[in-house]
Image (cartoon, helix red, strand yellow):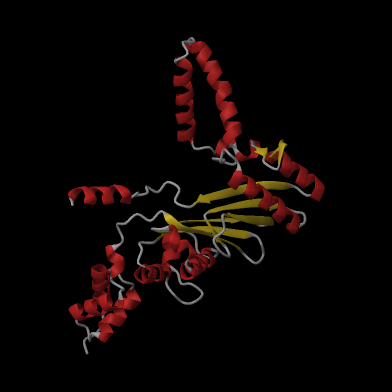
């Protein structure tokens, strides 16, 4: 039997798109013969994954998990092509397994290379899912928040199953006091982040992306100049409008959806007073499934009409 080298396995992986372990097994079954191993993979349906890699994957699930001590939380987005897959129990379990890995490993590349609690390499697990379910999939992004003292809260909107949904939010509160109280306040703030009409862009004004500020400032300037007002007047107008815009998109300055007479900043201050310990919001993360992904839409009715007209 020919020696199954790492180079040989990699060659088959590049050719088929199947997982490394599947390629190794295929070569073992085929006694090292590359063509026979390729045929073995095709028979098992494992080489299909490579043929699907260029198809848009904007559906799927956002999975979230909080560590047992309540001080670390993660969100991951696992994409597929259709929303039907989000209801697949195997796909949901995979998303949860990846979230568990993300508690200990940070960054998509590192998570993809790590093993789940079941001993599967994440990237190979995804490749096998592609072959099994028949859709392109990818681990798109991951985020983690931690506190030394306090609590990290998780909220999943439009839940599709345990620990998975279509929108996920993490909120990290750093400080003393009752951890259960902080977790509940954090969850309420997470619900605010998920449901507020104007999704926050940053925690504080200083955290805003300079490019986003410049873009908004240019938009407001162009809008004001069109009114015919003098440049000097416009500049003063823009200063006030930028401050108002920042209050709308900065989380701490937003009116709390459960009590619009109170800002998030005031809610945190009130909680700090009631618990008798300093409290600060360390950060938040908001994942909306498929956000920013270009989705391909197929007009099946138009296709049917075109075919009918050709008959």
Question: Above or below — where is 283 with respect to 148?
Answer: above
172 left or right, relative to 119:
right
Q: Is residue 276 visible?
A: no
Q: Which residue corresponds to the image point at 74% horizontal and 58% vertical from the top-left?
A: 180
Residue 177 appears in which quarter of the rendering?
bottom right
Q: Which residue corresponds to the image point at 56% horizontal and 22% vertical from the top-left?
A: 239
Q: So how many labels did they put on this image?
A: 0
Q: Which residue corresponds to the image point at 48% horizontal and 17% vertical from the top-left?
A: 224
Q: Is residue 235 visible?
A: yes
Name the residue nearer the viewer: 247 or 276. Answer: 247
277 left or right, relative to 106:
right
Residue 262 image offset from top left, x and y in percent: 72, 37
Name the residue nearer the viewer: 18 or 55. Answer: 55
Quarter of the figure that contains the N terminus: bottom left
Name the residue nearer the viewer: 18 or 43. Answer: 43
Residue 138 image offset from top left, x and y in percent: 39, 60
Residue 171 image offset from top left, x and y in percent: 62, 51
299 left or right, relative to 79:
left
Q: Which residue corresponds to the image point at 27% horizontal and 85% vertical from the top-left?
A: 28
Residue 51 image offset from top left, x and y in percent: 27, 64
Question: Above or below — where is 3 with respect to 9?
Answer: below
């Amino acid at each position: 039997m020919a020696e199954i080298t790492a180079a040989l396995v990699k060659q088959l992986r590049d050719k088929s798109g199947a997982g490394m372990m599947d390629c190794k097994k295929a070569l073992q079954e085929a006694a090292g013969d590359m063509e026979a191993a390729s045929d073995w993979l095709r028979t098992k349906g494992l080489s299909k994954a490579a043929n699907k890699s260029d198809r848009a994957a904007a559906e799927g699930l956002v999975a979230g998990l909080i560590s047992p001590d309540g001080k670390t939380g993660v969100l991951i987005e696992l994409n597929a092509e259709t929303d039907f897959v989000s209801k697949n129990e195997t796909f949901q379990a995979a998303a949860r397994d990846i979230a568990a890995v993300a508690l200990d490993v940070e960054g998509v590349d590192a998570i993809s290379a790590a093993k789940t609690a079941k001993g599967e390499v994440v990237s190979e697990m995804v490749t096998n899912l592609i072959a099994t379910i028949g859709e392109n999939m990818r681990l798109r992004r991951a985020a983690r928040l931690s506190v030394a003292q306090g609590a990290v809260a998780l909220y999943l909107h439009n839940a599709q199953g345990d620990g998975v949904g279509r929108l996920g939010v993490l909120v990290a509160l750093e400080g003393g006091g009752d951890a259960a109280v902080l977790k509940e306040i954090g969850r309420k703030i997470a619900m605010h982040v998920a449901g507020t009409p104007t999704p926050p862009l940053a925690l504080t004004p200083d955290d805003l992306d300079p490019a986003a500020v410049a873009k908004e400032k240019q938009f407001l300037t162009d809008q004001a100049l069109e009114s015919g007002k003098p440049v000097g007047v416009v500049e003063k107008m823009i200063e006030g409008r930028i401050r108002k815009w920042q209050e709308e998109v900065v989380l701490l300055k937003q009116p709390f959806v459960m009590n619009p007479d109170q800002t998030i900043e005031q809610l945190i201050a009130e909680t700090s007073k009631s618990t008798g310990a300093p409290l600060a919001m360390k950060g938040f993360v908001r994942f909306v499934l498929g956000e920013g992904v270009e989705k391909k839409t197929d007009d099946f009715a138009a296709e049917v009409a075109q075919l009918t007209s050709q008959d």
